[in-house]
Amino acid sequence: MGQGGAAALRQRIRRFDHAVTLPLVLPRSPRALRLVATALAHSGDLPVWIALLAAAWWRGGPSWQMRAWVTGAGLALLEVLVIGIKSLIRRQRPPGTDGLIYRKADPYSFPSGHAARAVLLILLALRLGPPAAFIAIVAWSPFMVLSRIAIGIHWVLDVAGGALLGALLTVAVLGGASALGITL
């Protein structure tokens, strides 16, 4: 594919992404719905998960501490990868003013770190348990990820790319733990 063909393909993908994303963005009112979506969007922030992992480490026994260690290592690696990819791709977030904290701290949208984090957490909870954690994360994560689109700070393909990255990194984390002799 020549340079013109690649540019045309990128343009078609961008048009598709816009056409799929824009209908999912919430209107300015009712305000209460936007506030709920914003709270859900923040529930996937990394500090929330660091606090939860610290609590699991502190309050749990050895099996919880191992879960917290493996999950924390996965989240740290994922954060580095997301930041690196965003720095390379430099895709701008959708237009708007919501999610100002994200827009200022991280102006780029691809891949969605929140979607990547959600998939990593789902797959690790599936593998490491307990079942209640898996069920809770599976129930919460789609709403959190969709809220990122609903408040207008991610495109649909940002979320899809983040989900794929989260799945790939989970495989690497579990493989790395196994190679280190960590029984999960």
Image: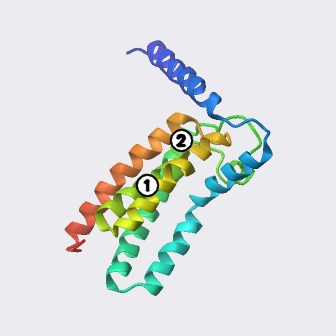
Q: Residue 20, located in which quarter of the rendered image?
A: top right
Judge left or right: residue 181 versus residue 68.
left
Q: x, y (%) of residue 168?
A: 34, 49
- Tell me which amino acid carries mark 2: Phe
| Mark 1 nearby-residue class (10 Å; few <14, some 14–19, many ≥20) | some
The number of discs equals 2
Element class at badge 2: loop
Element class at badge 1: helix
The answer to whether marks 1 and 2 mark residues whose Cβ atoms lie closer than 8 Å is no
| Mark 2 nearby-residue class (10 Å; few <14, some 14–19, many ≥20) | many
Q: x, y (%) of residue 128?
A: 31, 67
Tell me the quadrant of the picture where the N terminus can be found. top left
Q: Earlier in the sequence, mark 1 or mark 2?
A: 2
Q: Which residue is mark 2?
A: 110
Q: Residue drawn 72% across and 54% down? A: 101
Judge left or right: residue 7 versus residue 91.
left
- Tell me which amino acid carries mark 1: Val
Q: Residue drawn 55% across and 74% down? A: 51
Q: Residue drawn 64% across and 28% down? A: 23
Depth check: 24 or 131 in front? Answer: 131
Depth check: 35 or 20 in front? Answer: 35
Q: x, y (%) of residue 178?
A: 21, 67
Q: Residue 87 bears which disc, if any?
A: none
Depth check: 83 or 19 in front? Answer: 19
Q: Residue 138 bears which disc, if any?
A: 1
Q: Residue drawn 41% across and 14% down? A: 2
Q: Residue 133, located in which quarter of the rendered image?
A: bottom left
Judge left or right: residue 38 versus residue 87.
right
Judge left or right: residue 25 versus residue 72.
right
